[in-house]
Image: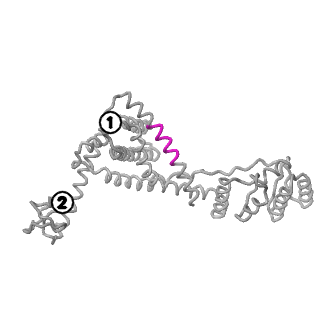
């Protein structure tokens, strides 16, 4: 409560309802004089900060050391003494990702999401006009069709422009595989033209066409530098991680609602509040793990067993929280706990595959 002067008028300035006391019973606004002093602004600022800190620290204490307690309190209607779960999630996740992107993600080594492997160099290197002409004639004589001949003619034309090409020992098998798999196209038009020349049964399917066209665009954009592409893909995926976690939150709650579908007293919103508290706890535990690992690598202080204990506590925490909130026996809770971990693992795999696919097609 502020110490500002109370208005003599008994109508709320916000909703115009009749006020009985210092606060409006309709909207909750304090019925004080609207002209605020500089001192009043400062006092309000510190009151709001300390009020926020008090609720947040109280909520953190119960969140860390009494698994499921905050969710149980919320279910029973005791909410004013603790921080609102949604506000807590927004604040904690923002704090987590600011630190994560500032100190942890930026220091990771260049990832190798895609790695180009060079084939074994077998055969004759075409370095002289005579060897090129002889090899070209030998290959064309063994071509299986006009399509193979056209593709091989294009390959030799590209070789004449300055590249060094290696011909495989088994030319007949190479002509088949090169028409569909091994030819590297530089432009979309070149790829589309090659596809039109092929018989219908030898053309790439829809998924292969989408993937290869995307690879051509990526190669053009990054000039064939795979390390730049890997870094860009990794960065795009990491900066999309908050969105993925936000999407996974209601999906995780849906898994809980399926596991406890026979417990009619628990609504979907109940599972959502449980999931929010669990995610907030996971953010804080991950921050401790990352901070400890950074400290260990930078100074040598600490020990690897601390990280192990934190990870183990995260999994124990989920079990104990489920026991407290859903009030079932150890056997049932353990069974549902195991099923939840399995389903969550599959869900996260699906989401992360989708994340990297989305990043790949949006670079």
Judging by the rendered image, the residue that carries numbered circle 2 is 28
Query: Is label 1 in a helix, a strand or a loop?
Result: helix
Query: Is label 2 in a helix, a strand or a loop?
Result: loop
Residue 230 in the magenta stretch? The answer is no
The secondary structure that most of the magenta stretch takes on is helix
- Residue 358 left/right relative to 329: right
Residue 342 in the magenta stretch? The answer is yes
| Number of other residues with Cα within 10 Å of mark 2, as a class: few under 14, some 14 to 19, many 20 or more | few
Residue at point 74%, 54% (across, down): 203
* Residue 327 x, y percent position in the rendering: 31, 33
The circle drawn on residue 240 is none
* Residue 141 x, y percent position in the rendering: 92, 54
The N terminus sits in image quarter: bottom left
Residue extending furthest toward the left: 8
- Which residues fall within the magenta stretch? 340-351
Asked which colour scheme the image uses, the reply is one colour
- Residue 118 left/right relative to 63: right
- Residue 313 left/right relative to 190: left
Figure check: 6 above or below 251: below
| Number of other residues with Cα within 10 Å of mark 1, as a class: few under 14, some 14 to 19, many 20 or more | some
Judging by the rendered image, the residue that carries numbered circle 1 is 326
Residue sitting nearer the eye, 93 or 172: 172
Q: Quadrant of residue 90?
A: bottom left
* Residue 314 x, y percent position in the rendering: 39, 39
Residue at point 81%, 56% (across, down): 165
């Amino acid at each position: 409560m502020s110490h500002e002067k109370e208005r003599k008028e008994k109508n709320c300035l916000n909703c115009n309802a009749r006020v009985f006391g210092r606060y409006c019973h309709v909207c909750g606004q304090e019925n004080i004089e609207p002209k605020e002093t500089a001192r009043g602004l400062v006092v309000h600022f510190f009151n709001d900060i300390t009020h926020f800190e008090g609720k947040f620290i109280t909520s953190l204490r119960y969140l860390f050391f009494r698994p499921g307690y905050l969710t149980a309190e919320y279910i029973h209607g005791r909410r004013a003494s603790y921080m609102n779960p949604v506000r807590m999630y927004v604040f904690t996740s923002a704090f987590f990702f600011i630190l994560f992107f500032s100190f942890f993600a930026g220091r990771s080594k260049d990832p190798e999401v895609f790695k180009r492997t060079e084939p074994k160099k077998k055969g004759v290197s075409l370095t002289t006009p005579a060897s090129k002409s002889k090899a070209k004639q030998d290959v064309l004589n063994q071509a299986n069709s006009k399509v193979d001949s056209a593709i091989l003619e294009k390959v030799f034309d590209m070789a004449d422009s300055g590249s060094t090409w290696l011909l495989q020992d088994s030319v007949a098998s190479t002509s088949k595989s090169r028409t569909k798999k091994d030819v590297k196209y530089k432009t979309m038009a070149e790829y589309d033209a090659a596809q039109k020349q092929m018989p219908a049964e030898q053309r790439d399917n829809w998924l292969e066409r989408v993937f290869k066209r995307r690879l051509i665009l990526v190669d053009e954009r990054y000039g064939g530098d795979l390390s730049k592409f890997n870094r860009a893909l990794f960065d795009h995926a990491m900066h999309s991680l908050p969105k993925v976690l936000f999407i996974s939150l209601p999906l995780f709650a849906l898994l809980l609602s399926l596991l406890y579908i026979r417990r009619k007293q628990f609504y979907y919103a109940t599972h959502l509040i449980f999931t929010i508290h669990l995610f907030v706890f996971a953010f804080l535990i991950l921050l401790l793990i990352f901070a400890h690992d950074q400290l260990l690598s930078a100074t040598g202080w600490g020990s690897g067993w601390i990280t192990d204990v934190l990870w183990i506590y995260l999994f124990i925490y989920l079990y104990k929280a489920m026991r407290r909130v859903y009030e079932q026996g150890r056997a049932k809770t353990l069974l549902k706990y195991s099923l939840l971990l399995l389903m969550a693992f599959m869900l996260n795999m699906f989401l992360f595959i989708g994340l990297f696919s989305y990043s790949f097609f949006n670079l």
